[in-house]
Amino acid sequence: MFKELDPILHSQLRLAVMSLLIGVKEAEFTFLKEKTGATAGNLSVQIQKLKEAGYIDVIKQFKDNYPQTICKVTIQGIKAFEEYVRNLQSYLGK
């Protein structure tokens, strides 16, 4: 039987953000924007959804008088991502 896929992670951009954060643990907004090719507005909305789900923490600060946004994957986010991958593998028969 197929397992349900997490609708938060099933979005292409949110899945891309989580995949990147799983690999690096934390990243600046500009890095995520560059790697995903998303617009700043769309990326902001998707990051907010991941934050509301508890999958990432967002830290806003200033660095050299410029605003800086850092996204960090949470323990809950890691667990959700791992479960998503396991459930997706059930579709592939692995």
Image (cartoon, helix red, strand yellow):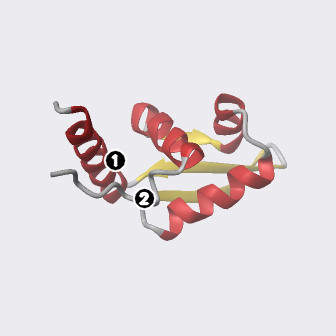
Q: Earlier in the sequence, mark 1 or mark 2?
A: 2
Q: Residue at x 22, y 54 (%)?
A: 3
Give the amino acid type for the residue marked by disc 2 in the picture. Answer: Tyr
Position of 11 relative to 19 (above/below): below
**Residue 59 seen anywhere in this rendered image of the structure:** no
Give the amino acid type for the residue marked by disc 1 in the picture. Answer: Phe
Query: Badge 1 local density, few (<14 within 10 Å), some, or many (20+)?
Result: some
Mark 1 or 2, closer to the camera: 1
Where is residue 59, by image quadrant? bottom right
Position of 90 relative to 83 (above/below): above
Kind of element beneath mark 1 = helix
Question: Residue lying furthest bottom in this view?
Answer: 52
The residue that disc 2 covers is 55
* Residue 42, image x, y percentages: 74, 53
Q: Residue at x 72, y 49 (%)?
A: 68
Question: Residue lying furthest front in this view?
Answer: 1
> How many numbered marks does the figure carry?
2
Q: Residue at x 38, y 55 (%)?
A: 74
The residue that disc 1 covers is 81
Q: Is residue 82 left or right of residue 19?
A: left
**Residue 25 seen anywhere in this rendered image of the structure:** yes
